[in-house]
Image (tube, helix red, strand yellow):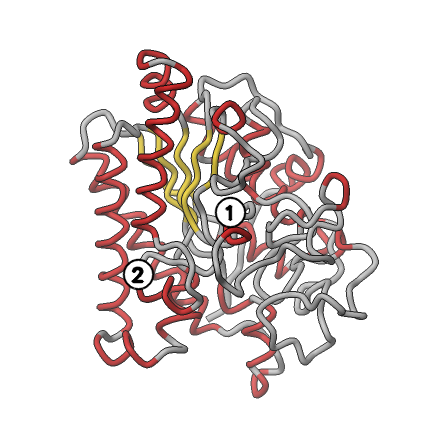
């Protein structure tokens, strides 16, 4: 099945010509849960190999610092925060260099390598989603002590809560480890994950969250790691994984419809990066990209590693010409374009 993504030229021009969509927002904070797509360095402070606190990661970040973000620079939630008139980067909750005054307008509890499924977080010994929620409860108590009960409760109610995870449940867990694939077929496993997502959102709501963005999956079959494995397909995107991502996204979208009916006063939106990212991959020149199938810190066509190598001699000169930074994660420029799209087309309702 061929995926044709028709985006009007006006939208593309708008994305490319708006590197910063700064808006005076009603959102006082951006609070983040998820995986490496939105981890700003929490994994630096836990015993796991799933880290990116070394160069060439962060080489285009302010000061050329490897913060633990899985990119050459900023990640999507950094751009979302900036677009809402808040700070340009969202700190990691476990980073001891930040205190509650730094975290009051934005914080991420995300952990690279995690997923909805606890078994996914066990693979690389990272922070499971339930533990991220426990950290959030701890954060609430600190916020109340810092801002006072009235102001803190208003922040909690009006904040934007961003969830971005799910890819690892399939690529790192279901299709790699023997456990879940012997318990569930792929449709059952998707339903299992959607149930966890729904339960998490219900718990967030019970803790005061009202503005929530549930993130969808990217075209997983087009990640450089998966394309490298597609030897018999000429290193093209794996259609089966892209189909899976679309199926799962449809289930998440249906979940948002259901919970908007079930949960009082909730404003739950589905932020889908799939089609905008696939458009970039299929028509890179429209967005100013040159390379789609391999990553900037790659080793040619034999890019089987999850992350960049500390001593890699193959890192590209200009990451802005690449859609992907490493075999799993987009470049800063890709993150910026996807974030601009999501803010304009989905999150704008919170303005």
Q: Quadrant of residue 270?
A: top left
Q: Position of residue 303 (x, y in %)?
A: 65, 76
Residue carrying label 2: 117
Taking the spot 61% from the left edge, 46% from the top edge, the residue there is 335
How far is mark 2 from mark 1, CA to CA? 17 Å
Note whether 274 is above or below 32 in the view shown: below
Q: Position of residue 119 (x, y in %)?
A: 31, 66
Taking the spot 28% from the left edge, 74% from the top edge, the residue there is 180
Looking at marks 2 and 1 on the same chain, the residue that comes earlier in the sequence is marked by 1
Q: Residues within 10 Å of mark 2 (few under 14, many from 20)?
A: many
Residue situated in front as seen by the camera: 351 or 225: 225
Residue situated in front as seen by the camera: 273 or 138: 138
Q: Is residue 69 left or right of residue 260?
A: right
Residue carrying label 1: 38
State the mark number for residue 327. none
Taking the spot 81% from the left edge, 55% from the top edge, the residue there is 318
Taking the spot 38% from the left edge, 20% from the top edge, the residue there is 155
Note whether 9 is above or below 81 in the view shown: below
Q: Is residue 139 left or right of residue 296?
A: left
Q: Secondary structure at mark 1?
A: loop
Q: Position of residue 78 (x, y in %)?
A: 58, 37
The answer to whether the residues at label 2 and label 1 have Cβ atoms under 8 Å apart is no
Residue situated in front as seen by the camera: 318 or 6: 318
Q: Secondary structure at mark 2?
A: loop
Q: Is residue 180 left or right of residue 12?
A: left
Note whether 328 is above or below 231 in the view shown: above
């Amino acid at each position: 099945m061929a995926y044709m993504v028709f985006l009007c030229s006006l939208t593309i021009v708008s994305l490319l010509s708006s590197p910063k969509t700064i808006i005076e927002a009603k959102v006082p904070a951006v609070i983040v849960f998820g995986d490496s797509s939105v981890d700003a360095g929490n994994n630096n402070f836990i015993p796991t190999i799933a880290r990116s606190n070394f160069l060439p990661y962060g080489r285009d970040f302010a000061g050329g610092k490897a913060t633990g973000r899985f990119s050459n620079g900023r990640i999507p939630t950094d751009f979302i925060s900036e677009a809402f008139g808040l700070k340009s980067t969202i700190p990691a909750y476990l980073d001891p260099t930040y205190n509650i005054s730094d975290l009051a307008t934005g914080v991420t509890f995300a952990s690279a390598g995690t997923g909805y499924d606890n078994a996914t977080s066990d693979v690389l010994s990272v922070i499971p989603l339930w533990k991220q929620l426990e950290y959030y409860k701890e954060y609430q108590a600190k916020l109340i002590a810092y801002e006072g009960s009235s102001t803190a409760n208003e922040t909690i109610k009006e904040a934007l809560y961003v969830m971005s995870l799910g890819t690892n449940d399939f690529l790192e867990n279901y299709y790699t480890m023997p456990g879940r694939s012997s318990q569930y077929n792929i449709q059952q496993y998707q339903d299992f994950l959607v149930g966890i997502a729904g339960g998490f959102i219900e718990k967030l709501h019970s803790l005061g969250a009202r503005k929530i963005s549930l993130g969808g999956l990217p075209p997983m079959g087009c990640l450089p790691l998966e394309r490298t494995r597609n030897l018999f397909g000429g290193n093209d995107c794996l259609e089966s994984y892209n189909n899976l991502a679309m199926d799962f996204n449809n289930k998440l979208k249906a979940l948002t419809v259901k919970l908007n009916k079930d949960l009082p006063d909730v404003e739950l939106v589905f932020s889908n990066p799939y089609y905008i990212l696939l458009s970039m991959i299929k028509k890179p020149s429209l967005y100013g990209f040159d390379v789609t199938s391999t990553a900037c810190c790659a080793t040619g066509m034999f890019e089987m590693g999850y992350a960049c190598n500390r001593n890699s001699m193959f890192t590209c000169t200009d990451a802005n010409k690449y859609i992907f930074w490493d075999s799993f994660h987009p470049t800063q420029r890709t993150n910026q374009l996807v974030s601009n799209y999501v803010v304009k087309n989905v999150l704008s309702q919170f303005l």
